[in-house]
Image: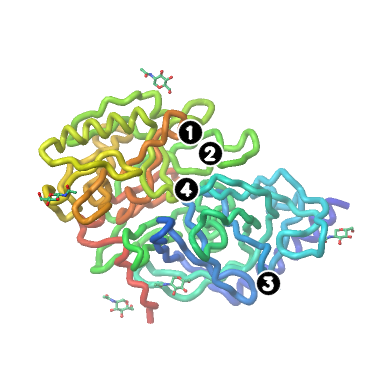
């Protein structure tokens, strides 16, 4: 019985995909725009989902497992399909739970015999349980220079979640780009058979959006800068233990970790406990990149060492009282400025060898908290942090980060300000 149900379902799934394939086309790359919410500092994107299509605002979660959205209020769609327990979709999603019976009338998020996952609000770290389902998603294609025709994914998997507290106003869920088979990059790549590559370029301004590209470059910014032309590559590292708020034992983390080996300030090595830089068997330690932390969060001992070294390197500049959540602030009238922000010591995250480093300049290290006060934009995470270094939003703005899932590597551009462009300089005018 179970297997014939399974078979029937697969058949209808195939018919749906082949009939809609005629109305869509096969783009080489897709894009989303992403705007920084000024009050929460979250990066918010919007997808068009359902039939009829409605815009759904979502907080970007770079390491998030999948797209989750609220299904409880006003979800109306003729193309929603629940994922039946033990179906191909449930196994792709690694769903182990099954809602055998949902009390109440059937609707998205409440269906009998549907597999369930744990959508995670990674801002507040509250996870709920929600049904896996699929629906139609329309997204703009791109040639890397402008947005182009809209492409349709007839059956994009997502999870119904309800933990919206703490997300930016108007947001209905989170857009997970993490290392799973059902994250947005994985699903877009398999829907259109383009490489499992995506890139993010976050704008530092709330007034003009940055961009996420799904697929390979070009990634072109005004005036005619190819942001992927000078990338430096480092391996992505797998954390064997999930870092989600709730998870099943044995799950690996869906977040993107890189191997920081040491930190230098103005070329001098900062003394830090190396043990904290490696991921241990319980999944503690290491360095990850996050879009839900507005600033880099450090283990207390690393935080203290960096502040000390940075203050020493800038000892000629008058310090002012620190402004929470930061611990090291300066009178900016005494600091010069450069093309890449305030003239402060460079911070290098040294990676797989001494010649490969991620150099952080003033625009990404310093935060302007008032007219004449600039603070080092790193915060103290405490001594019990799960991950020792969480590279946050401010530190990756106006940098292009390309994630190559097939090759398990990160390509990073360092500050695009050097190339006289920014992440806000993508030309969002529709191509003719
Ligand atoms: C951003 O994307 C949304 C959804 O596709 C669209 O409605 C909006 O016009 C876009 N904004 C820009 C600046 O392109
Ligand atoms: C689930 O199945 C029960 C028993 O067949 C039925 O009464 C109920 O309406 C169904 N619920 C949903 C949400 O489909
Ligand atoms: C370095 O960190 C590890 C992990 O937290 C800890 O067990 C060890 O005691 C630390 N070593 C020193 C010298 O502080
Ligand atoms: C910064 O320095 C200027 C010039 O010396 C001074 O007028 C201003 O009050 C200082 N600001 C702070 C916050 O100390
Ligand atoms: C932006 O793209 C449009 C459409 O291709 C083009 O007409 C326009 O010249 C571009 N803008 C700039 C500043 O290059």
**Quadrant in the picture for residue 214:** bottom left
Residue position marked by numbered label 2 in the rendering: 243
258 left or right, relative to 245: left
**Numbered label tally:** 4
Percent across and percent down for residue 359 are 25, 43
Secondary element at image label 1: loop
Q: Where residue 300 appears, x then y in whole percent? A: 37, 30
Label 4: how many Cα within 10 Å (few below 14, some 14–19, many 20+): some
On the rendered structure, is 216 left or right of 75? left
Ligand 1 within 8 Å, label 4 CB: no
Which of the marked residues, 4 or 2, is nearer the chain's N terminus?
2
Along the line of sight, the residue nearer the viewer: 212 or 381:
381
Q: Secondary structure at mark 3?
A: loop
Which of the numbered marks, if any, corresponds to residue 110? none
- Residue 260 percent coordinates (x, y): 35, 34
Q: Earlier in the sequence, mark 4 or mark 1?
A: 1
Q: Residue at x 35, y 43 (%)?
A: 325
Q: CA distance from mark 3 to mark 4?
A: 32 Å
> In the drawing, what numbered circle is on residue 405?
4
Residue position marked by numbered label 3 in the rendering: 77
Viewer-nearest of labels 4 and 2?
2
How far, Cα to Cα, is label 1 from label 2?
Answer: 8 Å
Depth-wise, is mark 4 or mark 1 nearer the camera? 1
């Amino acid at each position: 019985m179970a297997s014939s149900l399974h078979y029937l379902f697969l058949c209808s799934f195939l018919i749906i995909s082949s009939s809609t394939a005629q109305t869509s086309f096969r783009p080489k790359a897709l894009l989303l725009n992403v705007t920084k919410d000024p009050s929460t500092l979250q990066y918010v994107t919007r997808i068009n989902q359902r039939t009829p299509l409605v815009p759904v605002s979502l907080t970007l979660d770079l390491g998030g497992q999948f797209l989750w959205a609220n299904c409880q209020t006003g979800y109306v769609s003729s193309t929603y399909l629940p994922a039946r327990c033990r179906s191909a979709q449930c196994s792709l999603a690694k769903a182990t739970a099954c809602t055998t019976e949902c009390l109440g009338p059937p609707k998205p998020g409440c269906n009998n015999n549907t597999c369930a996952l744990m959508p995670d609000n990674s801002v507040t770290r509250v996870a709920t349980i929600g049904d896996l389902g699929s629906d139609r998603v329309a997204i703009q294609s791109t040639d890397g220079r402008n947005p182009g025709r809209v492409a349709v994914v007839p059956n994009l998997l997502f999870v119904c979640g309800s933990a919206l507290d703490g997300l930016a106003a108007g947001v209905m869920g989170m857009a997970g780009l993490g290392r799973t088979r059902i994250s947005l990059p994985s699903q877009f790549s398999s829907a259109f058979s383009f490489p499992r590559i995506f890139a993010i370029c976050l704008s530092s301004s709330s007034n003009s959006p940055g961009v996420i590209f799904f697929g390979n470059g070009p990634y072109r910014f005004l005036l005619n800068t190819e942001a992927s032309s000078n990338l430096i590559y480092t391996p992505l590292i797998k954390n064997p233990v999930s870092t989600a708020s709730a998870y099943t034992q044995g799950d690996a983390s869906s977040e993107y970790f890189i191997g920081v080996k040491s930190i230098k300030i103005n070329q001098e090595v900062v003394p830090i406990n190396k043990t904290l830089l490696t991921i241990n068997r319980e999944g503690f330690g290491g360095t990850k990149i996050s879009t839900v932390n507005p600033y880099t969060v450090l283990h207390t001992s690393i935080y203290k060492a960096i502040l000390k070294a940075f203050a020493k390197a800038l000892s000629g500049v008058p310090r002012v009282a620190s402004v929470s959540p930061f611990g090291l602030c300066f009178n900016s009238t005494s600091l010069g400025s450069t093309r890449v922000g305030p003239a402060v010591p460079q911070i290098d995250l040294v990676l797989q060898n001494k010649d490969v480093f991620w150099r952080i300049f003033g625009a990404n290290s310093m935060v302007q908290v008032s007219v004449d006060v600039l603070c080092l934009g790193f915060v103290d995470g405490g001594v019990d942090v799960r991950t020792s270094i969480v590279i946050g939003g401010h530190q990756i703005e106006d940098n292009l980060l390309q994630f190559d899932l097939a090759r398990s590597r990160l390509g990073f551009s360092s500050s695009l300000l050097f190339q006289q462009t920014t992440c806000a300089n993508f030309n969002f005018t529709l191509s003719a």
